């Protein structure tokens, strides 16, 4: 099927508050598909959408873990009295020789 940008435009107009990726990224699947696939939205099957959703959910979980880790380090540093210009290495080096960040 030929890429028809009008279908995506119709979807965006009908569901304007939503963001439709086009093309969609379908992640690799062990034993089924060794490489990720990019497919125009209008050519995607319902299963393709399901696999794309699973892939995005996995990325989101990873990003949330990274966000949580960075937030934890930041909060520990601030609670420990670190100033904004202190490096993470300075804050957590175990050096308690004085005020952090000066």
Image (cartoon, rainbow, N blue to C red):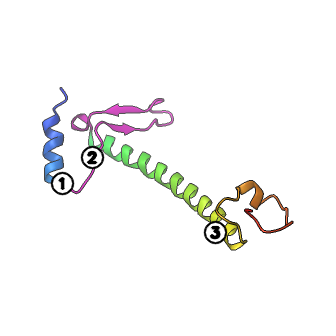
Identify the residue position indicated by label 1 in the image: 15
* Image position of 84 with respect to 15: above or below: below
| Label 3: element kind | helix
Q: Are marks 1 and 2 in contact (CB under 8 Å)?
A: yes
Mark pair 3, 1: CA separation = 39 Å
Name which residue lies at 34% across and 47% down.
Answer: 50
| Label 2: element kind | loop
* Mark identifier at residue 6: none
Looking at the magenta stretch, what is its main secondary structure?
A: loop
The mark lying in front, picked from 2 and 3, is 3
* Image position of 12 with respect to 32: above or below: below
- The quadrant where residue 93 appears: bottom right
Identify the residue position indicated by label 2 in the image: 20
Name which residue lies at 26% across and 34% down.
Answer: 40
Say if the magenta span includes residue 27.
yes
In this rendering, position of residue 4 left or right of residue 71: left
Position in image of residue 3 (x %, y %): 19, 29
Mark pair 2, 3: CA separation = 35 Å
Mark closest to the chain's N terminus, 2 or 3: 2
In this rendering, position of residue 70 left or right of residue 60: right
Q: Are marks 3 and 1 in contact (CB under 8 Å)?
A: no
Which residue is the extreme one toward the front? 102
Identify the residue position indicated by label 3 in the image: 75
């Amino acid at each position: 099927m030929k890429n028809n940008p009008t279908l995506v435009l119709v979807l965006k107009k009908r569901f304007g508050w939503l963001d439709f990726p086009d093309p969609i990224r379908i992640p690799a699947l062990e034993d089924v598909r060794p490489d990720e696939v990019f497919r125009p939205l209008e050519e995607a099957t319902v299963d393709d959408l399901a696999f794309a959703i699973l892939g995005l959910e996995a990325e989101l979980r990873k990003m949330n873990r990274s966000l949580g880790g960075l937030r934890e380090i930041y909060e520990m540093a601030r609670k420990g009295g670190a100033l904004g210009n202190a490096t993470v290495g300075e804050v957590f080096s175990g050096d308690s020789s004085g005020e952090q960040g000066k």
